[in-house]
Image (tube, helix red, strand yellow):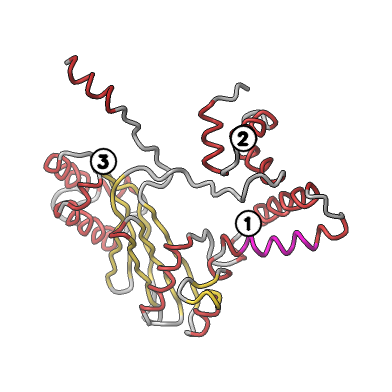
């Protein structure tokens, strides 16, 4: 397979490795990006790759709580300027209230529903905002949660909604505890609540990568297994919420902070605006020339 400059660039962005190392890794793995990341890690050249795509699209996240129900949504637009528009903010609030009250299961279903059960459809309301504001606007995704009277939601918006986190804690009605957990999730970006949530397949894959890494460092095989288990602990700390040092008090784990409050983390959802979306690449000079030629 031909290795393109774009592929090398993407691998460099994901791993921080040098250009020639990235090119060699892609050649050795026949252009397979994930395999190339593992190759670089096994050689000790790259850190554990955060495979999140570049943050690109504009917009905001919004959290709506109504009694024992809550929703987190992401709404995208084309420019950051629009996110400061009052009409856009009102649309976010209306959509959040709709998701909580009508409980759709998919974006497609939500768009076909009447806003809050009456009048125009959600799709029509969004299109109306598009024609007024003058930019493409879309409801990208949402998640809903339900709790009992003995539980609490943790709602946190960072940078005005560039990152939004909704968490559900059982065993406490103290909303500040939930907010603290959500603030931690926004800052550290764990992928799972607990170790149990990490699939056996992912753990075994990581174990193999760490084993190859240790052997390539020239470590004796008899101590490699012990080393791998130690490094696996670090792996869990990177991706598992309860195993992480609490951002507001790094001397204790999130697990202990929550347990001391008599609570447990049931779930969390973290949205970062535009994650996984490609940003439109614009060449300003070409744009100007295209306008002149019209």
Residue 232 is inside the magenta segment: yes
Residue 171 x %, y %: 46, 82
Magenta stretch prevailing secondary structure: helix
Q: Left of 286 or right of it: where is 116?
A: left
Residue 193 x %, y %: 53, 66
Q: Which residue is mark 3?
A: 78
Distance from disc 1 to disc 2, alpha carbons, whole Å, reads 28 Å
Q: Which residue is mark 1?
A: 199
Picture disc at residue 60 = none
Distance from disc 1 to disc 3, alpha carbons, whole Å, reads 37 Å
Disc 1: CA contacts within 10 A as few (<14), some (14-19) or many (>=20): few
Q: Which residue is mark 2?
A: 22
Which quadrant does the C terminus fall into? top left
Disc 2: CA contacts within 10 A as few (<14), some (14-19) or many (>=20): many
Element at badge 3?
loop
> What's the residue at 81%, 59% (across, down)?
225
Give the camera-side residue of 191 and 213. Answer: 213
Q: Which badge, 1 or 3, comes first in the chain's sequence?
A: 3
Give the camera-side residue of 68 and 249. Answer: 249
Element at badge 1?
loop
Numbered range of the magenta stretch: 226-236
Residue 159 x %, y %: 31, 59
Residue 166 x %, y %: 38, 65
């Amino acid at each position: 397979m031909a290795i393109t400059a774009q592929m090398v660039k993407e691998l460099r962005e994901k791993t921080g490795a040098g250009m020639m190392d990235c090119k060699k890794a892609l050649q050795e793995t026949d252009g397979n990006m994930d395999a190339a990341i593992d190759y670089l890690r096994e050689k000790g050249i790259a850190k554990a790759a955060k495979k999140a795509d570049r943050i690109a699209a504009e917009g905001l996240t919004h959290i709506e709580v109504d009694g024992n129900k809550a929703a987190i949504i992401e709404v995208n637009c084309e420019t950051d300027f629009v996110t400061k528009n009052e009409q856009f903010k009102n649309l976010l609030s209306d959509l959040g209230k709709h998701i909580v009250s009508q409980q759709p299961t998919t974006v497609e279903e939500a768009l076909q529903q009447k806003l809050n059960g009456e009048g125009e459809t959600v799709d029509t309301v969004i299109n109306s905002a598009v024609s007024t504001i003058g930019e493409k606007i879309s409801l990208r995704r949402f998640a809903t949660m339900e709790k009992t009277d003995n539980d609490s939601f943790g709602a946190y918006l960072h940078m005005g909604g560039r990152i939004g986190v909704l968490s559900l804690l059982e065993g406490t009605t103290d909303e500040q505890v939930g907010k603290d957990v959500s603030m931690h999730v926004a800052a550290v970006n764990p992928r799972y609540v607990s170790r149990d949530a990490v699939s056996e397949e992912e753990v075994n894959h990581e174990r193999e990568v760490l084993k190859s890494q240790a052997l390539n460092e020239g470590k004796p095989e008899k101590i490699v297994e012990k080393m791998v288990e130690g490094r696996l602990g670090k792996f869990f700390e990177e991706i598992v919420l309860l195993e992480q040092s609490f951002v507001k008090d790094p001397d204790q784990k999130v697990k202990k902070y929550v347990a001391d409050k008599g609570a447990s983390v049931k779930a969390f959802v973290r949205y970062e605006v535009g994650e996984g979306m490609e940003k439109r690449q614009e060449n300003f000079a070409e744009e100007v020339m295209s306008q002149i030629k019209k």
